[in-house]
Image (cartoon, grey):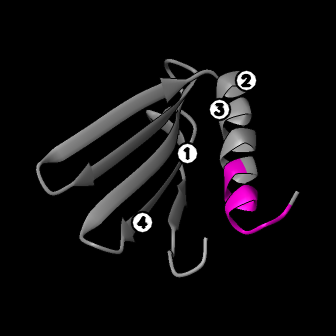
Amino acid sequence: MSGITFTTREHQAGSLRVRESSANLPGAGHLSIAATRSTRLVDLSMLRDCMSVYLEFSPEQARAVAVELLACADALQGRA
């Protein structure tokens, strides 16, 4: 993602998260993506102004969503 820098943290055994990445978005938003050990889910949260979105995906769902996000980005850039 051009212009967006993620900070990534790997966590030790026994902690709540396996991995967590976050970034400040242009326009005063904040995005966080994490792999949660206890639920075995991928968490995606975005905070912007007064809006908050929190989604949870299984690993398989997260992969499918990632593929569709990339396909939409490619479509906007004229790639097939």
Image location (x, y in percent) of residue 16 = 44, 33
The mark that comes first in sequence, 3 or 4, is 4
Image location (x, y in percent) of residue 48 = 23, 56
Name the residue beneath numbered marker 3. Answer: 62
The mark that comes first in sequence, 3 or 1, is 1
Between 74 and 18, the one nearer to me in the picture: 74
Spatial CA span between label 3 and label 4: 18 Å
Spatial CA span between label 3 and label 2: 5 Å
Name the residue beneath numbered marker 2. Answer: 60
Q: The residue tagged with tag 2: helix, strand or loop?
A: helix
Between 15 and 41, the one nearer to me in the picture: 41
Magenta span: predominant SS is helix
- Residue 4, above or below 66: below
Please state which amino acid type lies under the numbered disc 2: Glu
Which residue range is magenta in the image?
Answer: 72-79
Residue 12 circle label: 1
For label 4, count other residues whose C-alpha is less than 10 Å away and answer few (under 14), some (14-19) or many (20+): some
The mark that comes first in sequence, 4 or 2, is 4
Left or right of 23 on screen, residue 65: right
Check contact, mark 4 vs mark 1: CB within 8 A: no
Please state which amino acid type lies under the numbered disc 1: Gln
Check contact, mark 4 vs mark 2: CB within 8 A: no
Residue, far right? 80
Spatial CA span between label 1 and label 2: 24 Å
Please state which amino acid type lies under the numbered disc 4: Ala
Check contact, mark 3 vs mark 2: CB within 8 A: yes
For label 3, count other residues whose C-alpha is less than 10 Å away and answer few (under 14), some (14-19) or many (20+): some
Name the residue beneath numbered marker 4. Answer: 23
Q: The residue tagged with tag 4: helix, strand or loop?
A: strand
Spatial CA span between label 3 and label 1: 23 Å
